[in-house]
Amino acid sequence: MAHYALPPYSKLHDATPLFLSPVFSSSAKATNRRNPLVRMAGHVSTGGGGNVASFEEGHLERPRWTGETPLSRLVGALISIKPLYSFMKLGARRVLISTAEKTNIPWRDMTKEILESEVYKELECVENPAIVYPDYYLNPFHAYDEGNLSWLAAAEAEAATMSMVRRAIPDAPSLDEANKIVRGNWLQAIEQHHLQYSGSSTIRDILDVGCSVGVSTRFLADKFPSANVTGLDLSPYFLAVAQYKDKRKAPRTNPIRWIHANGEATGLPSNSFDIVSLAYVLHECPARAIVGLLKEALRLLRPGGTIALTDNSPKSKILQELSPVLFTLMKSTEPFLDEYYMLDLEQAMREAGFVTVCTNLTDPRHRTVTGTVPLSP
């Protein structure tokens, strides 16, 4: 077995997803910690799907630091200065990791454990050598030069996801309590939408597109234990970690299946899933890829099937009020951030063929947008 030593702390590339900022925001305090579906004033869900939870929205349609605004152009100019860009990445990474570890997320220990494990043996099992990566996927993401196609990105993904959840609910007493809000509201939005609009409460097959190292996939499998759950991702490194971690957990009645494929052209049979989920995926995609993902999801879902998209909310008060340092950092590590924020996602879903499109702000930073495949042509 090959052991990979973790690079020195200051040399690690930044793994910060778009929705991770170096310091916790103090905004959007939870009003009732005893209730995992925390309610906050100011938000009303749209589309008739019913409120899953209410959180405070900002007054804008999207942050001023997106699109072709003067502020956005200034940020772009700063990012283009390579020495400044490199300095921002290094400083942000130091703060990100130290902040995570101060909230009891052992980032470096978790990363080292994966890199020094036998995870490498899983790669051959999951990798599809026939994959042709789309051009946008070969861009640097989160300040990794190789984007998601690296062991370091895969080894750090779960710690980064934990940090995202803690950052979304900074007042939660523990990661578990934060997950009850972030993941609980997301799963409830999916379940409520499917019960209301599918014409059937049966959920037999679930596809998690862009599953990364399988965190969201396992939440879906736990929520719907009788369903057959598939995790699909373009990174074989992420899938290797997902499968490695899954093998070390108690066996499931319905084991999760891991597939290395392009979410825009999965090669899976049409009308074969009841739910297609994309969790924290779209902000990493250009608009054309988002449209492709929606079209493929429509093909894969059965009539009455539910699509669920959870990601940053352009209307989030916290994201709209980020400090210049933080939004500059986020834009520096996300090449398609503006395209995501400028896209009318709900309209794109309708144009792809989905009906009953509903949006809920399911935590202070993230929205869950759900839609249905028409029951009849």
Image: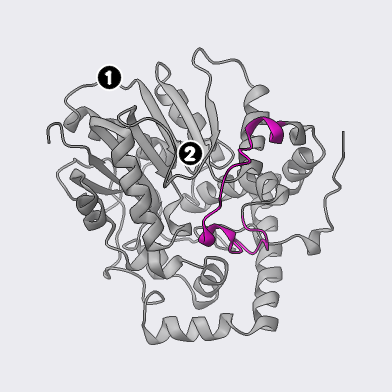
Residue found at the far left of this picture = 376
The spot of residue 27 in percent (x, y) is 42, 61
Instruction: Tell me the residue that label 1 is attached to.
Output: 202
Q: Residue at the top extreme? A: 253
Magenta range is 122-147
Q: Which mark is residue 25?
A: none
The residue that mark 2 highlights is 179
- What is the distance, in whole Å, between disc 2 and disc 1 at their CAs? 25 Å
In percent of the image, x 66 and y 36: which residue is there?
240
User: In the rendering, at what x and y percent does residue 64 appear?
Assistant: 36, 77
Residue 24 vs residue 159, the one in the foreground: 159
User: Position of 327 compared to 128: left or right?
Assistant: left
**Quadrant in the rendering for residue 263:** top left
Q: Is residue 28 visible?
A: no
- Position in image of residue 99 (x %, y %): 65, 56
**Residue 120 in the figure: left or right of residue 130:** right
Residue 154 vs 12, above or below: the answer is above
Asked if 317 appears above or below 293 in the picture, the reply is below
